[in-house]
């Protein structure tokens, strides 16, 4: 009688690819061009055809002008929204109100303050992710948002075979998230965090929220998404927390959560969305946004 | 996070040379992976979808040979999940198969292997999808428990249990088919699902 192991060996030998040498040899560069074409097909299917004559060029001008107008209107709306934000008028902090009422960490009125932006970022990342010594970049001054930034790298850069090794030589290490910072006086404060992999779309930055607050966003996730509302206190206490089901690491998936909170110890807080990584030791991706806690 | 943002980001960060290296190194095993799971006329599509996903999520590709396991995971989902949501999936489902033995084996030993292969593949086709997948990843991709868990996104302990069960069930089904074949030697042979 044939044993289990012998059947397994038969199964190994039945590998249909074992004797298949018919794989075509495809030039990698050409394949990359093919992928680009496919990607463009996927993402830009609504792009009008290239202009072929004077009328097409005219149409492009109109489209360009319309796009510029949309950008201007959107920009103006953002500016107006920011200026009309209640945070400017109701800041619990001393001047300059426009700076300190929009910082998430540390608490300018009671927390440990940092004169080094990287240390401020490190403290924030540890607070949010629980990773004790996250790999961080140097501070990058003058980001397009006007804020300074510190990148949080994926843990893989520190592992053998990581991006810095000869085997990988992949150039820049993977950035899990980016912490945004602002300097007020001699101290540095975190104003938020963003990531390509997770985005908080609601509430918007510095928006006043009341209980229950609806949190919405989207992202690529390995595991579930932990959504928290934290107070800007010395310990950044968690006012409310929810776990939204994760989606796919291969496609953008929306998430929503509803957080209820009672009386708050401070008027400023922040919302965070953190991926729960499936592998231990990894630095999870996260996003954070300051909110004003309403009554 | 939007499509436009993602496209722009890729345009900036995707290193062509590194991707080409990844492609050259892993094209063949990824193709073999797909070759083992879909009909031959769908293999190139599955491979292309896999590398397209890798290109789009290039910064997520892990270092070293972990990249291959990551690509297997992508290919597994391309075949089993992403295509399910498209019309093409229907066409794929109609052609999905456990694996059919390829023709063209002429040597005597290969003929014997072919008979045994048909039988063991027919036995594998009687297993559940997850059991069969664990067997394929073990026997054909030669992955360990941890890597299989990564591909299937399940716990290593679950992989161990499934592997144990799948091996036992495969042998049982094989013996069952073998006994039938012995009792009815002219019965048609086949491994396709």
Image (cartoon, coloured by chain):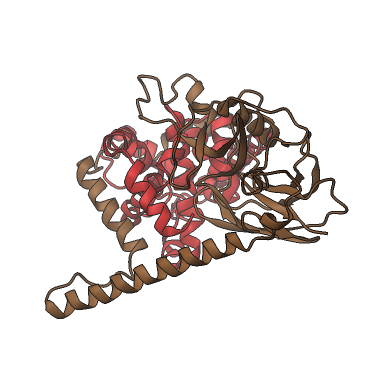
Chain colours: A brown, B red
Give left or right: position of A148 versus B46.
Answer: right
Residue A284 location, quadrant: top right
Q: How many marks?
A: 0
Residue A183: x %, y % from top left: 57, 35
Residue drawn at the location 72% of the way across and 51% of the way down: A91
Residue A76: x %, y % from top left: 48, 66
Residue farthest toward the right in the current orientation of the protein: A263
Residue B95 location, quadrant: bottom left
Vertical order, A110 against B92 (above or below): above
Residue A108: x %, y % from top left: 72, 36
Vertical order, A96 against A65 (above or below): above
Residue B97: x %, y % from top left: 45, 55
Observer-nearest of A125 and B86: A125
Residue drawn at the location 81% of the way across and 60% of the way down: A211
Residue A179 location, quadrant: top right
Residue drawn at the location 50% of the way across and 37% of the way down: A148
Residue farthest toward the bottom in the current orientation of the protein: A55
Vertical order, B113 against A241 (above or below): above
Observer-nearest of B186 and A249: A249
Quick check: can you spot residue A224? Answer: no
Quick check: can you spot residue A242? Answer: yes
Residue farthest toward the left in the current orientation of the protein: A53
């Amino acid at each position: 009688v044939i044993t289990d192991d012998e059947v397994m060996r038969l199964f190994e030998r039945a590998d249909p690819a074992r004797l298949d040498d018919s794989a075509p040899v495809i030039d990698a560069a050409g394949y990359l061009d093919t992928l680009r074409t496919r990607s463009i097909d996927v993402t830009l299917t609504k792009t009008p055809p290239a202009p072929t004559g004077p009328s097409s060029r005219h149409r492009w001008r109109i489209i360009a002008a319309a796009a510029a107008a949309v950008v201007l209107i959107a920009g103006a709306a953002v500016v107006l929204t920011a200026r009309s934000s209640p945070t400017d008028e109701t800041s619990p902090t001393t001047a300059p109100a426009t700076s300190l009422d929009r910082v998430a960490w540390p608490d300018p009125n009671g927390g440990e303050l940092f004169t080094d932006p990287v240390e401020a970022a490190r403290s924030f990342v540890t607070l949010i992710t629980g990773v004790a010594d996250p790999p961080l970049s140097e501070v990058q001054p003058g980001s397009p948002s006007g804020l300074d930034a510190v990148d949080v790298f994926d843990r893989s850069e520190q592992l053998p075979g990581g991006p810095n090794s000869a085997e990988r030589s992949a150039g820049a290490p993977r950035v899990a998230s980016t912490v945004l910072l602002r300097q007020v006086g001699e101290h540095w404060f975190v104003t938020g965090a963003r990531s390509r992999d997770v985005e908080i779309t609601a509430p918007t930055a510095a928006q006043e929220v009341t209980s229950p607050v609806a949190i919405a966003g989207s992202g690529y996730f390995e595991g579930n998404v932990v959504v928290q509302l934290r107070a800007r206190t010395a310990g950044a206490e968690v006012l409310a927390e929810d776990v939204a089901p994760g989606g796919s690491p291969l496609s953008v998936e929306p998430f929503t959560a509803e957080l209820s909170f009672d009386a708050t110890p401070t008027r400023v807080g922040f919302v965070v969305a953190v991926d729960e990584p499936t592998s231990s030791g990894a630095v999870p991706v996260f996003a954070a946004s300051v909110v004003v806690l309403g009554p | 996070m939007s499509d436009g943002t993602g496209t722009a980001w890729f345009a900036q960060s995707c290193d062509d040379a590194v991707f080409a290296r990844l492609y050259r190194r892993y094209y063949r095993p990824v193709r073999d992976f797909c070759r083992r799971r879909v009909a031959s006329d769908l293999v190139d599509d599955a491979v292309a979808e896999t590398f397209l996903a890798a290109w789009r999520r290039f910064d997520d590709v892990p270092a070293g040979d972990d990249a291959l396991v990551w690509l297997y995971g992508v290919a597994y989902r391309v075949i089993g999940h992403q295509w399910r949501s498209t019309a093409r999936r229907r066409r794929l489902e109609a052609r999905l198969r456990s694996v059919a033995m390829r023709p063209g084996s002429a040597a005597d030993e290969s003929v014997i292997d072919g008979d045994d292969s048909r039988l063991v593949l027919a036995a594998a086709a009687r297993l559940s999808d997850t059991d069969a997948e664990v067997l394929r990843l073990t026997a054909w991709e030669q992955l360990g428990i941890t890597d299989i868990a990564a591909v299937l996104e399940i716990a290593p302990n679950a992989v161990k249990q499934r592997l144990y069960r799948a091996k036992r069930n495969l042998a049982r089904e094989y013996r069952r088919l073998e006994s039938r074949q012995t009792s009815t030697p002219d019965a048609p042979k086949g491994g396709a699902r």
